[in-house]
Image (cartoon, rainbow, N blue to C red):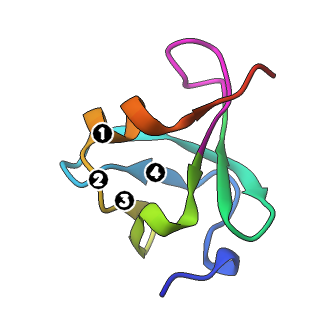
C-alpha cells in the first residue's frame, strides 16, 4: 500500500499507459493528490485519490489509463 509520505511535491504523475497526467502540487490531506494547474490543459487544479497510485519511484505511477483518469478526476475551480 502506498502512503502519503511517499508522494513529494513536483513529482511527475504518469498513467498506466505511460502518459503524463500532471505534476504533484502537494498532498491534500492523507488521501488526495492535488496536481498543479501550470501543466493542466484547462489551467485548473485537479485531484486524484491516493488509491489510484500503483507505485512510486522517481514518478508517481497510476493504475488507470490516462483517459480514465481524466474522465474521473476531481476538477477544482482554483
What residue is rendered at 56% in x and 43% in y?
A: 23
Mark 2 vs 3: CB contact within 8 A: yes
Q: Secondary structure at mark 2?
A: loop
Query: Where does the image place residue 16, in percent across and percent down from the top left?
Result: 24, 55
Q: Are marks 2 and 1 in contact (CB under 8 Å)?
A: yes
Q: Answer with the quarter of the image where residue 35 lies.
A: top right
Label 4: element kind:
strand
Q: CA distance from mark 2 to mark 3?
A: 6 Å
* Residue linked to disc 3: 62
Neighbours of disc 2 within 10 Å: few (<14), some (14-19), many (20+):
some
Nearer to the camera, 49 or 2: 49
Residue 55: give x, y in percent of width and height.
39, 75
Instruction: Return the residue at label 2.
Output: 64
Tell which tag, 1 or 3, sits nearer the viewer. 1
Label 1, label 3: how many angstroms apart (C-alpha)?
11 Å
Q: Is residue 13 visible?
A: yes
Residue 4 occupies quadrant: bottom right
Question: Looking at the image, which is closer to me, 22 or 73?
Answer: 73
How crowded pointer 1 is (Cα within 10 Å; few <14, some 14-19, many 20+) is rated as few
Provide the residue span drawn in magenta: 37-47
Callout 3: helix, strand or loop? strand
CB within 8 Å, label 2 to label 4 = no
46 inside magenta stretch: yes
Is residue 41 placed above or below 34 in the rendered structure?
A: above
Give the CA separation, mark 1 to mark 4: 14 Å
The residue carrying pointer 3 sits among few (fewer than 14), some (14 to 19) or many (20 or more) residues within 10 Å by Cα, namely many
Question: Magenta region, mostly helix, strand or loop?
Answer: loop
- Residue 68's disc is 1
Amino acid at each position: 500500500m502506498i502512503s502519503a509520505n511517499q508522494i513529494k511535491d513536483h513529482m511527475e504523475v504518469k498513467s498506466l499507459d505511460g502518459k503524463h497526467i500532471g505534476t504533484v502540487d502537494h498532498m491534500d490531506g492523507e488521501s488526495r493528490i492535488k496536481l498543479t494547474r501550470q501543466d493542466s490543459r484547462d489551467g485548473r487544479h485537479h485531484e486524484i485519490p491516493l488509491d489510484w497510485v500503483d507505485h512510486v519511484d522517481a514518478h508517481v505511477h497510476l493504475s488507470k489509463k490516462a483517459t480514465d483518469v481524466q474522465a474521473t478526476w476531481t476538477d477544482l475551480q482554483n
